[in-house]
Image (tube, rainbow, N blue to C red):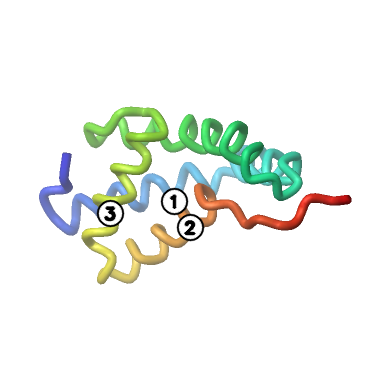
Amino acid sequence: PPFPTLDAAREAARNVRVVFSDPKNISQMDKLQQDCQGDISKFFQICIPAASEILGSIIQQYGFEPNPNGCVEFTQELGKFVEDPDIRELEQELKARFMPTVYPKPA
C-alpha cells in the first residue's frame, strides 16, 4: 500500500527511526551482525529476520506485512519520497540494517 502523502511517509519514517533507535534493538542488531562475522549467508539467516521482526511491528500499522517482503515493500514505498531529507536519511539507515557490510571470512 502506497503512502498517500509525504506527511504520511514522514510519520512512518519517524516511527521506524524511534524503534531502531531503541538501545535494546541497537544492541541486538549489533550483536547479531558481529556474530555473522561478515558471512553474507549468516547475515541473511540471522539479521534479516531479526530486523524484520523489529520493523514489522511498525510497518504493519501502515498496511504492510510484518515479514521480510513487507519490509522490502515498505522501504521501496519510502524510496518514492527520497527527495525529502528526513526520508532519505531513514532510507540510508534502513539499508545499513538490511544490507550487510561484507568482510572476508577469517582464515
Question: Residue at position x 35%, y 43% from top?
Answer: 72
Give the CA distance from mark 2 to mark 3.
Answer: 12 Å
Mark whose residue sits in front, 1 or 3: 3
x and y percentages locating residue 97 in the rendered image: 53, 50
Mark 1 in CB contact with mark 3 (< 8 angstroms): no
Return the mark for residue 88: none
x and y percentages locating residue 6 in the rendered image: 17, 58
**Relative to residue 68, is residue 23 drawn left or right?**
right
How many C-alpha atoms fall within 10 Å of the one at disc 1: few (<14), some, or many (≥20)? some
Where does label 1 land, which residue?
A: 17
Task: In the rendered view, tell whether residue 85 sits above or below residue 27.
Answer: below
Where does label 2 land, which residue?
A: 93
Q: Secondary structure at mark 1?
A: helix
x and y percentages locating residue 44 in the rendered image: 57, 38
**Relative to residue 96, is residue 27 drawn left or right?**
right
Q: Residue furthest right?
A: 107
Mark 3: which amino acid? Leu
Return the mark for residue 78: 3
